[in-house]
Image (cartoon, rainbow, N blue to C red):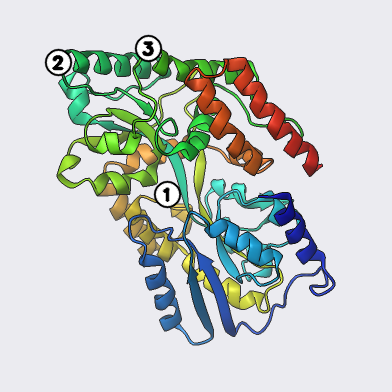
Amino acid sequence: MSLASVSAITASACSPSSGGSTGSAGDGKGTVEFWSMPYWIGQDDKVKELVDDFNASQSDVKVNLTQLEWKDGREKIKQAIAAGKGPDVWLMNNGLELDYLKARSLAPLDKLGYTAADTARFSDLVEVNEYENKLYGAPLYFDAGVMLYRTDVLRKYGYEKPPATWEELKRTASAITEKSAADGGKISGWQFKGMDDHVNAINSTWESFLCQAGGSLTSPDHKKSTQHTEAGKTTMNYMRSFYQDKTSPVGTSALNGFIDGKVAMFSFFQSVIANVEAGGDKTEGKWAVAPMPKGPESGCSMVGGHSLVANAQGQDLKAAGTFMKWLASPERSVRYMDFHAIFPYDPAKIDPSVKATYDKKIAGDPSWKPILEQASRNSPDLVLQDRHGWATRWEAQKSAIVAGVNGQLPVDEALKSVDGEVGKALDAEQ
């Protein structure tokens, strides 16, 4: 986010016109403006269908949906909120954005009608949406970085199980690359998402592997960027080794290559499964999911996903809360599992009928066991660190991490570059 946008959000939250206070609780009847990107992966029309279902379910609250595109939707929301003309409810990444939180632009869930009993049903990962001991985002679903592998390719080259450690991953990937080249197959054993045509993905990829090496993004007080460390160097040297020995080719699409059978393994958020399934005959019965290979310290990965947030200056916070509680309810969240979204509630604390639907989905798809294992390895810590200096970090990592991994920059220089840029952003937050 630009400095101008940050300043505008802050000014809007504290301007005389807004009184620097939260919006009205209201009578819970009225119109809610909802701005959203198409978060139902693979079916862009599903968000509209859900809003239509909500509007048909009752007469007290009407929701108007403004559909945005991923390429510029977040920026349009920021600009509208800064101008005092933004939505009442909108979609935001889990972890939320610090500028909104510091500017008091978001309404805490307890002001939206959420009770302690309501929030107690969420899984422990809901902590990613906490700020100063209050919850500000209602999670629709979580994502977790997992590994996808081509079962047909691994079996062809003598592997019945996916690699479980960094060492096994490198050894397996290198062997597949070498053996396939020898028989004319030219299959890349592995590709890091973000070293391909989806460069932004290097952020979640890098942060997952850094976590596995025991690294962190910031100091505990969030005042210092901490990537130029032994853990950072271990991570970058490991990732770099795949390109030094030609196991992985920079620029080859991890996802498209995987679908076409030209990439044997890659890692990304589990929601990419929807794209793999869309491969039809190219992928049907030929792939599987596994937890991330464990690094020197752990097998953790980045947490993602999306939440609903509400405008603190909204005219009727109760109406906004009514809609949020419906769209982010266990009943709707269990439907999001259709695109492999991780259920954001503790299954033991939800209605038995919803629990039965949840259990049926888990039992009917073998992908869920490794996904849930991976989710259990993860904590909110990395996301809470990433909140600080987020925009600067993600831009810096896209250039410096890619350059360090592919050998354009020395490892120390690449990591120092990230810390230098992010350090300036962290200083500005103080």
Where does the image place residue 236, in percent across and percent down from the top left?
A: 52, 19
Q: Is residue 9 visible?
A: yes
Q: Is residue 111 above or below residue 91?
A: below
Q: Nearer the viewer, residue 427 or 108?
A: 427
Q: Residue at x 49, y 21 (%)?
A: 405
Up-down relation of residue 298 to residue 204 (above or below): above
For badge 2, the amino acid type reads Asp
Residue 243, which numbered label?
Answer: none
Mark 2, residue position: 183
Of the pair 274 and 123, the residue shown nearer to us = 274
User: Would you identify the image quadrant in which residue 165 lies?
Assistant: top left
Question: How far apart are labels 1 and 2 at the CA level?
Answer: 40 Å
Percent coordinates x, y for residue 271 in the rendering: 38, 47
Q: Quadrant of residue 34?
A: bottom right
Q: Position of residue 369 (x, y in %)?
A: 34, 40
- Earlier sequence position, callout 3 versus callout 1: 3
- Which residue is denoted by mark 3 in the rendering? 245
| Element assignment for label 3 | loop
